Amino acid sequence: MADVAFQIKVPSDNDGFITLQCPFCDDRFKLTVEDFQREDIIEIFCPYCGLRDQHNQFLRDEVIEQAQIIASNYAKSLLNQWVKDLEKSTKRNKFVNFKAGKLPKLEAEKILFEQEELEITTLVCCQVTVKTRPLNKVIGVYCPCCGVR
Ligand SMILES: [Zn+2]
Ligand SMILES: [Zn+2]
């Protein structure tokens, strides 16, 4: 079977930030799309707990759910198409007759949106801007790029 690439649209907020979720403390913060895609940032440090992991570990729950819905819809639509084709191709066949039963329904994709009010902090060490909870702007955050607080 051929590889299929799914595209998931992750919306950014008005300032061009996307929401990320720490796999360790589940807290949310935002990075700019450019910083998230920077090649010198191989792993991201959570600005709250300072632990680090790979980029894809920081995708928030809704994005992962969305990916699962899209993948399962794709599988269902392939199956539906296959069943319809089979039905059509056996229509005039005297020996084999195939009638499709109930086809699986596709699941509605979720609407992803940005809701949190977070404050922008610029980390001079790596020139990274991060959005965190207002309190953390006061007490300090770990740099998502080098982990220094
Ligand atoms: Zn964390
Ligand atoms: Zn840094």
Image (cartoon, rainbow, N blue to C red):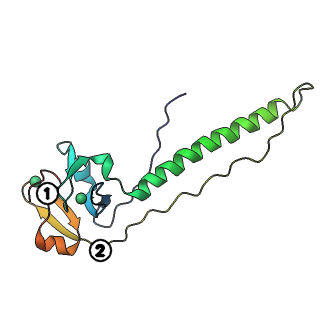
Quadrant in which the N terminus appears: top right
Look at label 1 and name its amino acid.
Answer: Cys
| Residue 143's disc number | 1
Drawn side of residue 18 relative to residue 69, left or right: left
- Check the image and name the residue furthest to the top: 95
**Mark 1 or mark 2: which comes first in sequence?**
2
Instruction: Give the distance between the C-alpha atoms of the residues marked 1 and 2, in whole angstroms.
Output: 20 Å
The front one of 103 and 22 is 22
The front one of 122 and 98 is 98
Drawn side of residue 64 relative to residue 35, left or right: right
- Dot 2 falls on a residue whose secondary structure is loop
Q: Quadrant of residue 41?
A: top left
Q: Is residue 88 visible?
A: yes
Q: Is residue 9 visible?
A: no
Report the number of numbered marks. 2
Quadrant in which the C terminus appears: bottom left
- Where residue 16 sits in the image (x, y, percent)? 29, 61
The image shows residue 138, relative to residue 72, as above or below, that is below
Q: Is mark 1 within 8 Å of ligand 2?
A: yes
Residue in the image at 19% along x and 68% along y: 120
Residue in the image at 29% along x and 74% along y: 117
The image shows residue 91, relative to residue 57, as above or below, that is above
| Residue 117's disc number | 2
Instruction: For ligand 1, give the image quadrant.
Output: bottom left
Drawn side of residue 126 relative to residue 28, left or right: left
- Check the image and name the residue furthest to the front: 24
